Image (cartoon, rainbow, N blue to C red):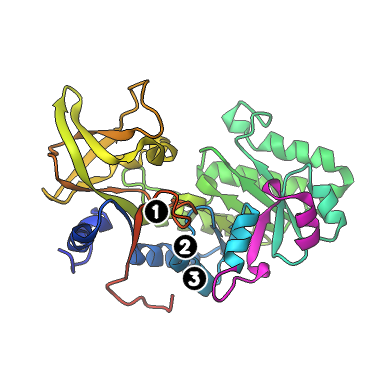
Amino acid sequence: MGNEKTPRGLPWWVARKFDLLAIASDVAPAIVYDDETFNETFFDLLCVQGVHTLLYSVKSNAHVRVLEKILKLGGLFKCSSQAEIDYLGGLYPPVPLDNMLVDARWLPDEYVRNSGQKVKAILAPITQYPVLTRCNINTFLSFDLSEEWISSNKSERGKLGLQRAAEILGIDAVRVKGVHIASSKEVSGKSEHVLELTWTIKKLFPEVHDVVLSRGLAIVRDQATGYLDFKSIRKRYDTLSREFPGLRFWLDPEDLAIEHAGGLLMKVQNAKESTEGMVVEVGLPVEFFLPFRKRQVLSNIYNLSTDKLLRGDLDLCNRYMGPQDRAVLRVKGRVTKGDLIFIGGFGALGMRLDRGSLGLHVHYLRARKMCAVKL
């Protein structure tokens, strides 16, 4: 199975079982990334007709191999902190500043004003936008659909935010050349919703020529597997290109595009039966899993010892459990002490692994097959 193509409907970690077993014989727990999955994801996104540019959020995964891949493909990097900018500049070769889009919300005003003309563009909220444009800095108006002041009505979410921004800018609204629609929370990503937002953007900002769609607005995922639904993505951008031939659409999927490209490999410390399934103790603290508990990534569990796909979730029912306590999983399926399990969905771990704060080993599985293009 280790050298075969992934069977239809099965995740990559099943096809690469023997590679994972080889890693586990050396060290576990460990984070494992799959080169083939990154290759296919980035290449397929860039091949979508109607996508002008692919943005890669550095905070999603700062592994040097992934960053090099984006640079070679001609993608741009979105930076949300000075640390991310410095990190890219410290690579060999360094990433040029004009390959970066910088989010002004998380950077000192002085840095933004001094370096704004060197980067590709600045993403700025309405409170910072007027000042930056007067400094002759290429600035995209950025707003968050999940902000409470926008609207409590999901069908109108986004429209009121755009209208308010246009009212604040007044006559300067005609100077807006780019709009970035962010979303710190999951929002409706239906294609008709994206079309409505784009029509509103075009109406309020008639001179706009660049629209950056973020997260669920940028991509579509299969509800059952969590993988990208490229058929629906191609259909979305085909419609957008047809409806708005004068606009360029930038794709900013953030962590949603690469979650499935990595996972956690570890041994079961202990397991016991309960009325709700198996209670599985693992050798990692609760704090490692907390950022992922709302994404339901823990449903992708593969028992390499029994060759079975399982479903589970993080057990946080114990109110006395602290961030440093060992995590407990509730798993539907047979698991015993000493079993080797792989939990998919950890491809977007940000920069903290590169800084060694978790003490986990990181393995990057090289592609087993050549890609049609140089990546």
The residue carrying pointer 2 sits among few (fewer than 14), some (14 to 19) or many (20 or more) residues within 10 Å by Cα, namely many
Closer mark to the observer between disc 3 and disc 2: 3
Q: Which mark is residue 347?
A: 1
Q: Is residue 90 above or below residue 190?
A: below
Q: Which residue is mark 3?
A: 68
Q: Earlier in the sequence, mark 1 or mark 2?
A: 2
On screen, residue 178 versus residue 53, left or right, reads right
Report how far apart the C-alphas of labels 1 and 2 lie in the structure.
17 Å
In the image, what residue type sits under mark 3?
Glu
Q: Which residue is mark 2?
A: 45
Q: Mark 3 touching mark 2, by CB under 8 A? A: no
Q: Residue at x 32, y 77 (%)?
A: 370
Which residue is at the front of the view, 280 or 303? 280
Q: Is residue 213 above or below residue 150?
A: below
On screen, residue 147 versus residue 116, left or right, reads left
In the image, is residue 56 part of the stretch drawn in magenta? Answer: no
In the image, is residue 98 part of the stretch drawn in magenta? Answer: yes
Q: Quadrant of the image for the C terminus?
A: bottom left
Report how far apart the C-alphas of labels 1 and 3 lie in the structure.
16 Å
Q: Quadrant of the image for the N terminus?
A: bottom left
In the image, what residue type sits under mark 1?
Gly
Chain part drawn in magenta: 90-115
Q: Residue at x 23, y 35 (%)?
A: 281
Closer mark to the observer between disc 1 and disc 2: 1
In the image, what residue type sits under mark 2?
Leu
